[in-house]
Amino acid sequence: MTQQEILSTDALPYLDIADADFSIRSQAVLDARDAAWCARTPYGLAVLRYDDVQKMLRHPKLRQGSYRWPAHSGVTGGAFARWWEQMLLSQEGSEHARLRRMANPAFSPKLISSLIPKFQALANRLIDGFAEKGECDFIAEFTEPYATGVICDLLGLPFEKWRELADIAGDMGLALAVSYKRDQATVDAATERLFAYAEELVALRRAEPSEDFIGMLVRANADTDQLSDQELLDMIVLAIFGGIDTTRNQLGLAMAMFIEHPEQWALLAEQPDLARPAVEEVMRVRPTVTWVTREATETFTYNGTEIPQGTTVHLFSQSAASDPAVFETTDFDITAKRKPHFGFGGGTHHCLGHFIARGDMTEALKLLAQRLKNPRFNGEVLWLPDSGNTGATAMPIAFDAA
Amino acid sequence: MKVHVDMSICLLHGQCVIAAPEVFSFDDDGGLVWLAEVDESLAADVEAASDACPEQAIVIG
Ligand code: HEM
Ligand code: SF4
């Protein structure tokens, strides 16, 4: 059977994930999840249930699926495509393992705990900027500078650099849209600027060794058999690019969930220790990465369905984490004990930055709940499509300052 | 040193297999197997695995 044939079997439900109005939270997705373990889509399959998503995240016949994105978009060459095709997320097997092993120490929970006071200072500083007004655009005035400021802390850059980094990441992000080819000049110029930044940071640490994030990566590179100069820079660029939009979007989604569940916000303000489980519960119900993409490296059979080589498989983190087969209750509840969600993916590509993201979002929610009482929407919220990597691009809110 | 994995929280991500392949591996059925007793010469790898485990399921004794 070819990918074309399996995609035309009527036995499986169909989800048009390419439609701009498609919502990952629609009834159609829930119905499909009830009806079958997977659905057909305009490009490949969508896996809908918890157990199958978990199994397929570590299936030996599936590889990460975005590596071919530049080629799919008609782009060959240029700084972005070169980096994208060679960086950690696009690698598999022993190459992936080698890069990941080298990067691990820089992302270890031990290193992150020393950054917690910086995250708190950053959150307070941003809240100070708008607390008296009683209103703000939560994205422009909090989540975006916070997500980027965290990366500045990680890299040892002053907070003032955040705007520049955010703009570079934004321009690079154009590569992930269907208009990549049209925007290629902008994308590649931004990528080159980010590499120039990374080179400066590395030169500084080589001159003055340190035990921080870049310092740990530079140390791994000292033995260049392990990590080449190019791979070192590729990893730094990935940490910057991979950490900004994800965290910005996830914190915006968190605020939206709490605005819709004010009693949970009040509870969090009373019990700051709930901030950590709150991050997990938000990511279960409203993950920014609503699916991760895989590709079949050879033809194999799963649950009686033959999946031909080359088939794209979308693992729906969103629908898996409300699967009634696994979650008895699925209402948003930051006190509930739950099975883990897939908001950070899973398997060999499980998010490398998750200790950082979990740490910085925990501190942010803790302080926000203390200082912003009774938050509510205060104008039109602008949303990205409710699929793929989702989130708000503008979120006017009002609140009572504590 | 003693190594134990709390299989009630392990999600089989395999980050330990990447970090310390001499100690952790997957069997043919995809189950996780590990050496319960390892030589001190592998201590650094085991610690790296324990740090890297996303579920923090590895207990070093
Ligand atoms: C809330 C914030 C974040 C979310 C929701 C998130 C989500 C994810 C997901 C779902 C993946 C797996 C992609 C796949 O399997 O196809 C991933 C991988 C990755 N993430 Fe994150 N991430 C976040 C923050 C960060 C941060 C702050 C960093 C770095 C500082 C980071 C660095 C990475 C890297 C390097 C990978 C690739 C890992 C590999 O291929 O082995 N992420 N992330
Ligand atoms: S890294 Fe942790 S969760 Fe993953 S297989 Fe090893 S012990 Fe299990």
Image (cartoon, rainbow, N blue to C red):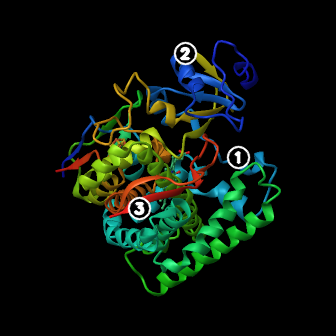
x and y percentages locating residue A377 in the rendered image? 50, 51
Q: Distance between the Cα atoms at labels 2 and 1? A: 31 Å
Left or right? Give the position of A324 relative to A113: right
Which numbered disc flags the more N-terminal residue, 3 or 2?
2
x and y percentages locating residue A359 in the rendered image? 36, 59
- Label 1 resides on the chain identified as A
x and y percentages locating residue B20 in the rendered image? 36, 51
Q: Nearer the viewer, residue B12 or A34?
A: A34
Q: Which of A389 and B24 is in front in this view?
A: A389
Identify the amino acid type marked 3: Phe
Q: Nearer the viewer, residue A282 or A323?
A: A282
Identify the amino acid type marked 1: Arg
- The residue singled out by tag 1 in the image is A68
Q: Distance between the Cα atoms at labels 3 and 2? A: 40 Å
- In the figure, A189 relative to A303: above or below? below
- The residue singled out by tag 2 in the image is A35
Identify the amino acid type marked 2: Ala
Q: Does the residue labelled 1 lie within 8 Å of ligand 1?
A: no
Q: Does the residue labelled 3 lie within 8 Å of ligand 1?
A: yes
- Characterize the local packing of mark 2: few (<14), some (14-19) or many (20 or more) Cα atoms within 10 angstroms: few
Label 3 residue SS: helix
The reply to whether discs 1 and 3 touch (Cβ–Cβ < 8 Å) is no
- In the figure, A3 relative to A279: above or below? above
Which numbered disc flags the more N-terminal residue, 2 or 1?
2
Residue at left offset 49%, top offset 49%: A253
**Residues marked 2 and 1, same chain:** yes
Label 2 residue SS: helix
Left or right? Give the position of A307 relative to B1: right
- The residue singled out by tag 3 in the image is A107
Left or right? Give the position of A67 relative to A104: right
Q: Nearer the viewer, mark 3 or mark 2?
A: 2
